[in-house]
Amino acid sequence: MAGTSGTPLPKKLGIRHGHSVVLLNAPANFERSLDVHAGSLAWTQTVSPRLATQVTYELGYASGFQASPYRYVPVRVALDAAPEFWVPETDPDELVRARLGAGADLHSQVVSANMV
């Protein structure tokens, strides 16, 4: 977690197990849920004693609140210019992601020697 101490927010606020939290003047859409479903399928093939290959497919589905209400994105006229203004981050209510990956691993031959 770059830029943070790594301490969970409830601990920073002194909220312990069994405590209740009351939010005063919270926005109407403050409490929204996020459902995430994911799965993956992998196939590994040993081609030779030195070569192994793998193909992986991953599919993920997220439904619900995904944007950070505290994250704002800068709008600039050039990459090195100061931001003209900031807009709140938005994400879709539903998101489907798919990934296909492939790889190979070539092992060098190991030579063992007896030490005297």
Image: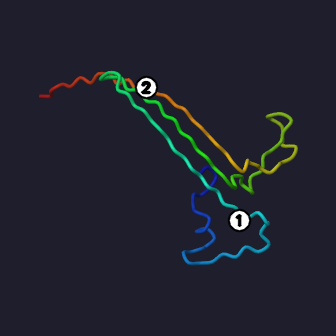
Residue 113 rendering spot, x and y as whole percentages: 18, 25
Using the image, determine if residue 41 lies above or below residue 89: above
Q: Badge 2: how crowded within 10 Å, few (<14), some, or many (20+)?
A: some
Q: Which residue is mark 2?
A: 104
Element carrying mark 1: loop
Q: Badge 1: how crowded within 10 Å, few (<14), some, or many (20+)?
A: few
Which numbered disc, 2 or 1, marks the residue that appears first in the sequence? 1
Calculate the distance from the C-alpha at mark 2 to the C-alpha at mark 1: 45 Å
Of residues 55 and 74, which is closer to you in this image? 55
Q: Are marks 2 and 1 in contact (CB under 8 Å)?
A: no
Residue type, numbered disc 2? Ala
Q: Which mark is residue 53?
A: none
Residue at figure coordinates x 62%, y 64% from the top left: 9
Residue 20 rendering spot, x and y as whole percentages: 63, 77
Residue type, numbered disc 1? Glu
Q: Quadrant of residue 68?
A: bottom right
Residue 1 rendering spot, x and y as whole percentages: 59, 51
For residue 88, side relative to residue 112 (left or right): right
Residue at figure coordinates x 66%, y 60% from the top left: 33
Q: Which residue is mark 1?
A: 31
Residue 95 rendering spot, x and y as whole percentages: 67, 45
Of residues 3 and 38, which is closer to you in this image? 38
Using the image, determine if residue 59 lies above or below residue 116: below
Colouring chosen for the image of the structure: rainbow
From the image, state whether disc 2 or disc 1 is nearer to you: 1
Element carrying mark 2: strand
Q: Quadrant of residue 109?
A: top left
